[in-house]
Image (cartoon, rainbow, N blue to C red):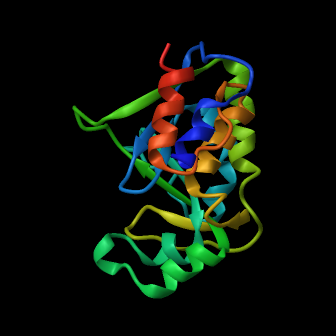
């Protein structure tokens, strides 16, 4: 219940309006952002080219951005690979990483939540995500196009991947729950403040 309580306490300025649509897509334990791969997004993340990230792939339409604990995020692609080290480090605290990926056209029926932003909000949102990166070379991803990058901040049970999602949304200037540690809190907060 406490994990959902933070979702109903609003923080941030406004409900999103505007021409930029960012999607929230839920995985088994957290949300990722899907950013449209337009010129603004490609320019904001142009530095990823230097690490071999395929941001200019001709079939790429969306940039996937997520943040999480290093041990869990980089070693548990599915729950079949779940291991005690990843669990232990998630509980006690861990370094964080950014996972960046590209995808093409989205499947019909993909369940997403939409965030709408004006130009200024989208610029702040992109900057907040960029500022989540730390120095250092990327780690291999799960397939040909994704990579993990060192990130700022530590992951722990109070600052989870879903809390980071809320931080990025509020950094854009959108109203969102003050603390969103679990997927249900992200979904509830979106419904309360951004489903317009």
Left or right side of 142 for 17: right
- Image-quadrant location for residue 176: top right
Q: Which residue of the protein is positioned furthest toward the front in this rendering? A: 1
Identify whether 142 is placed above or below 172: below
Question: Residue 141 location, x and y as percent?
Answer: 46, 70
Identify whether 153 is placed above or below 81: above
Q: Is residue 99 visible?
A: yes
Question: Residue 106 location, x and y as percent?
Answer: 31, 37
Query: Residue at point 64% right, 67% down?
Result: 156
Left or right side of 112 for 146: right
Seen from the viewer's position, the closer of residues 8 and 51 is: 8
Identify whether 156 is placed above or below 180: below
Query: Residue at point 24% right, 38% down?
Result: 107
Seen from the viewer's position, the closer of residues 74 and 166 is: 166
Q: Is residue 34 visible?
A: no
Query: Residue at point 54% right, 53% down?
Result: 66
- Image-quadrant location for residue 88: bottom right
Seen from the viewer's position, the closer of residues 108 and 30 is: 30
- Image-quadrant location for residue 148: bottom right
Question: Residue 3 location, x and y as percent?
Answer: 55, 48
Identify whether 166 is placed above or below 74: above
Question: Residue 185 location, x and y as percent?
Answer: 51, 41
């Amino acid at each position: 219940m406490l994990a959902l309580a933070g979702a109903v306490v609003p923080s941030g300025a406004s409900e999103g309006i505007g021409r930029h649509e960012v999607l929230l897509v839920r995985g088994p334990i957290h949300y990722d952002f899907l950013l449209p791969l337009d010129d603004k997004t490609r320019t904001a993340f142009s530095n990823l080219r230097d690490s071999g990230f395929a941001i200019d792939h001709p079939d790429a339409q969306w940039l996937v951005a997520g943040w999480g604990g290093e041990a869990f995020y980089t070693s548990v692609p599915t729950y079949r690979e779940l291991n005690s080290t990843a669990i232990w480090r998630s509980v006690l605290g861990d370094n964080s990483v950014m996972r960046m990926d590209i995808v093409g056209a989205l499947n019909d029926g993909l369940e997403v939540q939409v965030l709408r932003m004006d130009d200024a909000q989208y610029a702040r949102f992109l900057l907040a995500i960029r500022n989540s990166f730390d120095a250092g070379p990327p780690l291999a991803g799960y397939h040909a196009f994704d990579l993990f990058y060192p990130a700022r901040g530590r992951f722990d049970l109070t600052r989870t991947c879903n809390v980071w999602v809320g931080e990025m949304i509020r950094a854009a200037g959108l109203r969102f729950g003050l603390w969103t540690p679990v997927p249900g809190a992200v979904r509830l907060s979106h419904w309360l403040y951004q489903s317009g």
